[in-house]
Image (cartoon, rainbow, N blue to C red):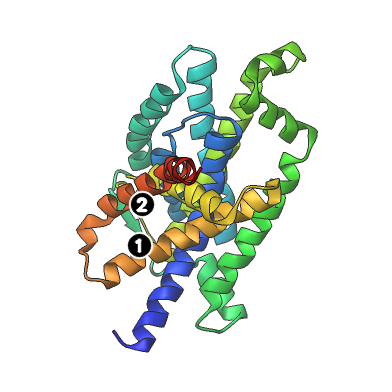
């Protein structure tokens, strides 16, 4: 592989990693902050994609399309939360039900088509490239959007509502004893979590200029891998550091995937590579404990 090809692969992985970092922040909110396993992600990210491309394909503002994608993701997360809190369905099963149902909903949003291309439509990336004509314009835009999302997310988690969300994930009974409606907190948390996922989906669709009904498969694994890798490699000493670590974990994850493909691994093995990466990341804690025990 030539140096130019290598740099191109690294740049492409970083551009995708910046988008997946927003997805990882959404997964972080549900899995880490609320301590709730949420599989809605595989469906809500496609909902965001579908909403984004349909707005763009009809000549709508691409920035507006991202906000529509965010709210579409919020709706998917809200349904999961309501199934869990109002109907008593376990969070894992509630997420699976919404994920399955969202497939049909996504097809309806896309007019019954399994994929919709927006190659000729305006996107945030095309608009930004006009303002900043550079081969790194997509990388710069991705970084700016991620920085804004991370900052907003950080300050939200430091508000009273944010502290209530974090407390709900830490100790649900204590929160109820303090007079806080934990069901409402889960509703808000899962809605925002999937809102971020939908936003990432809308951004991904505009980046790739296409939305496909099957693109959501395994996205929850990617988000979880990014969270685990980021925390393991970059640390979790403070809230801001954890959020930055999660984002860096997503970028590092994409780099590892690109490296595996550069070694000659076929693209059909993407899901297998993802599963192996998550397995290794999850087992690092146990490996460290056993290593510490032997040294002692």
Residue 32 x/y as whole percent? 56, 36
Q: Quadrant of residue 182?
A: top right
The answer to whether 184 appears left or right of 248 in the picture is right
Q: Is 161 situated above or below 91?
A: below
- Please report the residue visible at 58 percent of the width from the left and 56 percent of the height from the top: 234
Residue 277, numbered circle = 2
Residue 226 x/y as whole percent? 47, 51
SS under mark 1? helix
Q: Is 248 situated above or below 184?
A: below
Can residue 101 be seen here? The reply is yes
Pointers 1 and 2 in contact (CB under 8 A)? yes
First-in-chain label (1 vs 2): 1
* Cα separation between marks 1 and 2: 9 Å
Q: Is 157 situated above or below 179?
A: below
- Please report the residue visible at 29 percent of the width from the left and 47 percent of the height from the top: 214
The residue tagged 1 is 257
Residue 274 x/y as whole percent? 33, 51
Can residue 61 be seen here? The reply is no
- Please report the residue visible at 73 percent of the width from the left and 18 percent of the height from the top: 180
Q: Is 116 situated above or below 278?
A: below
Q: Quadrant of residue 26?
A: top right
Q: Quadrant of residue 181?
A: top right
The residue lying toward the viewer, choosing from 195 and 130, is 195
The answer to whether 256 appears left or right of 243 in the picture is left
Binning the other alpha carbons within 10 Å of mark 2 as few (below 14), some (14 to 19) or many (20 upward) gives: many
- Please report the residue visible at 44 percent of the width from the left and 52 percent of the height from the top: 54
SS under mark 2? helix
Q: Quadrant of the N terminus?
A: bottom left
Mark 1 or 2: the one toward you: 2
């Amino acid at each position: 592989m030539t140096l130019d090809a290598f740099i191109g692969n690294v740049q492409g992985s970083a551009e995708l990693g910046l988008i997946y970092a927003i997805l990882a922040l959404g997964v972080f909110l549900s899995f880490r902050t609320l301590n709730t396993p949420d599989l809605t992600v595989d469906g809500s990210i496609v909902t965001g994609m579908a909403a984004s491309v349909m707005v763009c394909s009809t000549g709508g503002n691409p920035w507006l399309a991202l906000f529509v994608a965010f709210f579409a993701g919020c709706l998917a997360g809200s349904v999961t939360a309501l199934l869990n809190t109002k109907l008593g369905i376990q969070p894992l099963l509630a997420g699976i039900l919404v994920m399955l149902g969202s497939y049909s909903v996504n097809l309806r949003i896309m007019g019954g088509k399994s994929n919709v291309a927006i190659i000729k439509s305006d996107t945030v990336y095309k608009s930004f490239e006009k303002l900043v004509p550079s081969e790194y314009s997509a990388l710069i835009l991705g970084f700016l959007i991620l920085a804004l999302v991370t900052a907003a997310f950080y300050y939200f988690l430091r508000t009273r509502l944010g502290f209530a969300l974090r407390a709900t994930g830490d100790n649900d009974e204590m929160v109820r004893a303090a007079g806080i409606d934990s069901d409402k907190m889960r509703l808000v948390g899962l809605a925002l979590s999937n809102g971020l996922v939908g936003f990432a989906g809308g951004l991904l669709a505009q980046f790739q200029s296409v939305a496909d009904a099957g693109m959501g498969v395994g996205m929850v694994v990617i988000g979880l891998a990014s969270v685990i890798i980021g925390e393991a490699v970059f640390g979790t000493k403070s809230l801001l550091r954890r959020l930055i670590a999660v984002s860096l974990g997503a970028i590092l994850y994409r780099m590892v995937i690109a490296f595996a493909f550069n070694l000659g691994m076929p693209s059909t093995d993407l899901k297998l590579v993802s599963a192996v990466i998550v397995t290794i990341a999850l087992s690092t804690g146990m490996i460290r404990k056993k290593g510490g025990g032997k040294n002692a």
